Amino acid sequence: MRATVCPVCGQPYLVRFDSAPPPRTAVTQRWDMWRYAKVMPLGEGEQPVSLGEGLTPMHDAPRLARELGVRRLWIKDEGLNPTGSFKARGMSAAVTRARTLGVPGFVVPTAGNAGAALAAYGAAAHLPVRVYAPATTPRPILDTICVFGADLQLVEGHIGDAGKQARAFAAESGYFDVSTLREPYRIEGKKTMGIEIAEQLGWRLPTHIVYPTGGGTGLIGMWKVFAELRAWRWLDSEGTLPKMIVAQAEGCAPIVRAFSAGEDRATPWENPMTHASGLRVPGPLGDRLILRALRESGGDALAVSEEAIAAGTRRVSRATGIDAAPEGGCALAVTEQLIAAGRIPRDAEVVVFNTGSGASYRF
Ligand SMILES: *Cc1c(COP(=O)(O)O)cnc(C)c1O
C-alpha cells in the first residue's frame, strides 16, 4: 500500500496501533530513537534504516531561565542528529517503511534539511534519491545533499514550487514521495522527540513546548504521542499535557495568522521570506492538525522579526554553547516575548527546540 493523503479530505493519514498497549519496559537498550521501536511502525524482525538518529541532549539552561524570568528552561538540541537536523528522525522512519514496501527510489521537495536527511538515508538503504530544493537554500545544505550522491534539482521559488515538481516526477517515475505529511511515517519518526522528552525528565512532561514550525511534523507527532503515552500509562504524573507553542518568522507565519484569527485552517502566506529556511513553508498541508494541537493543548503562537531571530540564535549559542540554527533562535525569541507578555507564566517549565545545526547556515 502506498499511503499518501486521504482522497476525500486531502488531509494526512496518522498511524494507529491496534495491538495491546505496550508497557514502559518495551523501551530497549539501544541508544538512538529506535529504542522506542516497539511503539513505532516496524515489523517483527525488520531492521530500521538507521544512522544513530535521536536521543539528543536536553540541556538544562538555568542561566537563560533566570534571564528570561521563568522557573525552568531546557533546550532540546536536535542539531546533533545525522546531517545536522531533526529531519533525520522522520526520514529514518519513512525510508525504513518504504524500503519494506519495495519502492524503486525516493523524491522530496525541501527547504534544505529534509533533502540532506533523505539523501543520507537513501544512501544507507541503497536506493536512489531525487531532491527538489529552492536555489536560495543555504549552500552547505545543498553540498550535503550532493555528498550522498542524490540527484539535486534546483528550483526557482519556495518549497511549494518544489513540491509541484516533486509530485510530477513521482507520478512519472514511481519514486516514493516523502513530502511532509504526504506519507504517515515521518510523523512517527518525529514523535520520538515527545517520548524522549518524557524519558529524559523521568517520565513526566514540561508545562510548555516551543517549536519552530514549518510543516509542523514534529508538533503534530509530539501531540499524537503525548496522547499515546497517557493511554499506555507511561507517564508517572497524570497531570495536564504540555501547552504546544508555534514559533514562526514574521515573513512567513501562516499558522500564527490563522491561530490569532481563531481559524481552524490556514491560508497560504504570500511572498514567504525568512533566513530561517526551515520555517519558509507558506502553506503547510497539516495546518488543521497543527491548529487542533494548539487548541487542544491550550497553546499559543507567535511570530518574530528577522532581527529577533538573529539575536535569539546568538543568545542560545553564547549562553549555552549549543551551535543553534536560526530556527532555534526563533523559538528562543518567541519564548522570551511570550514570557515578557505574561503568556508563558513565571512558574513554567519550558522546553525550547533547537531544530538544526548552526554550521549548516554559515557560508
Ligand atoms: C524542517 C525544519 C523545521 C520545521 O519542522 P516541521 O516539523 O516541519 O515544522 C524547523 N527547523 C529546521 C532546522 C528544519 O529543518
Image (spheres, rainbow, N blue to C red):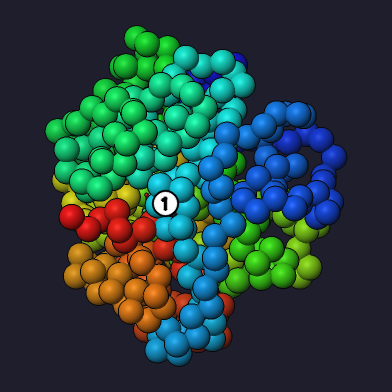
Left or right of 205 in this view: 78: left
Left or right of 134 in this view: 175: right
**Residue labelled 1 has its Cβ within 8 Å of some atom of ligand 1:** yes
- Judge whether 318 appears above or below 201 on screen: below
Residue that appears at 53% across and 78% down = 60
Give the tally of numbered discs: 1
Question: Amino acid under label 1?
Answer: Ser
- Judge whether 55 appears above or below 329 on screen: above
Residue bearing mark 1: 85
The spot of residue 348 in percent (x, y) is 55, 80
The quadrant where residue 284 appears: top left
Q: Secondary structure at mark 1?
A: loop
Q: Quadrant of the C terminus?
A: bottom left
As rendered, which of 360 and 259 lies closer to the eye? 360
The spot of residue 287 in percent (x, y) is 42, 44
Residue 128 shows up from this direction: yes
- Judge whether 311 appears above or below 156 on screen: below
- Judge whether 22 appears above or below 169 on screen: below
Left or right of 118 in this view: 200: right
Residue that appears at 54% across and 82% down = 72
The spot of residue 145 in percent (x, y) is 32, 37
Residue that appears at 31% across and 61% down = 358
> Label 1 crowding class (10 Å Cα cut-off): few <14, some 14-19, many 20+?
many
Q: Quadrant of the N terminus?
A: top right
As rendered, which of 99 and 205 lies closer to the eye? 99
Residue that appears at 23% across and 69% down = 310
Residue 222 shows up from this direction: no
The quadrant where residue 147 appears: top left
